[in-house]
Amino acid sequence: MNRSLFTLVLIFAALSVIHLLYLAVSRLQKDKDYTGIGFRIKTWWGMVFIFCLATLSNSVVSLLSLMVLAFFALKEYFSMIRTRKADRRLFLWAYLSIPLQFYWVYIEWYGMFIVFIPVYVFLLLPLPRLINKGTLGFLRSVSATQWGLMLMVFGLSHLAYFQFASPEYGAGLVLFLVVLTQLNDAVHYLASIYFGKHKIVPTSNPYLTWEGFSCAFVVTTAVSYLIYPHLTPLNPAFGYLSGMLISLSGFFGSLTVSVLKRDLLIGDDDKFAALKKSYLSRIDSLTYTAPVFFHVIRYFFDFM
């Protein structure tokens, strides 16, 4: 407990300094767009608040907070889809799967947790859409709903399972994962602003550049090696590998969600701009880093 509290105090202090620097730089350099960093700083404060509650109380508080986050992320994802009345019942069943998915985490039923959405929900979800709703738009509505559940619910629910799978190290592992994921996004964004020239997917996200990716990969890996002894029981080899893994999976998560949003919102630029401030834009990388990091650690270490 003392170690976790000390870590949170350090993160609080560091985040305060970063916030002050952001306010100063954004006023001095008005020609550059720092709004993406501003949104992520707000997200960081929210995450620090969640971790404070989890550290000072218990893991159930963190689980409920993450469940609410998954709900809003899925809700914003559904707001991007062009829907018909026939899709409303489908969305309702998708929402109902959220408390069930997190309930499996709470009772530590790993077998059901890992197959509930990818197997049972995927197989049964089309039924409400099939019954008396016709065939028009069936594939698009069902597959879009399933993809949203996979990212926003299944992916994010792994954050909650860390503390139940490993009560001793879970909170530190989640903090380690979130810090590196957000750091990777921030460095990629800033490096792309200052010297990014070769855009990866200019049609969907102009801030994803190869220069930004390279800088983020190096910085995230280095920071991972520096902080892993304080937050995790990992060995030095995994101190390096974890940074690389989180950087790569975070990049693919951000890239996938960016392309996904552009595809769903073709012709609706106003809505696309509004969603840059959404929950979905702030946790896109975590939808990939959380499950990838969780399963790699679970496979190689006995404490999970």
Image: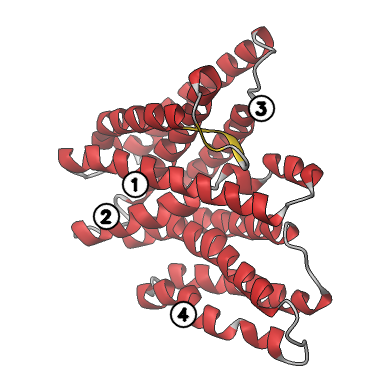
Q: CA distance from mark 3 to mark 1?
A: 29 Å
Q: Mark 2 near mark 1, Cβ–Cβ under 8 Å?
A: yes
Where residue 14 sits: x, y (%)?
46, 22
The residue to which callout 1 is attached is 173
Where residue 32 sits: x, y (%)?
64, 17
Between disc 2 and disc 3, the foreground one is 3
Can you say whether 253 is above or below 22 in the image? below
Q: Amino acid at mark 2?
A: Ile
Mark 4 and mark 2 lie on one chain; the one further toward the N terminus is 4
Q: Residue furthest bottom?
A: 132
The residue to which callout 3 is attached is 35
Asked if residue 290 lies left or right of residue 124, the reply is left
**Helix, strand or loop for disc 2:** helix
Mark 2 and mark 3 lie on one chain; the one further toward the N terminus is 3
**Which residue occupies 51% across, 25% down?**
192
Asked if residue 253 lies left or right of residue 78, the reply is left
Between disc 3 and disc 1, the foreground one is 3
Q: Amino acid at mark 4?
A: Val
Mark 4 and mark 1 lie on one chain; the one further toward the N terminus is 4
**Nearer to me, 89 or 42:** 89
Crowding around mark 3 (Cα neighbors within 10 Å: few <14, some 14 to 19, many 20+) is few
**Helix, strand or loop for disc 3:** helix
The residue to which callout 4 is attached is 119
Q: CA distance from mark 4 to mark 2?
A: 23 Å
Can you say whether 150 is above or below 37 in the image? below
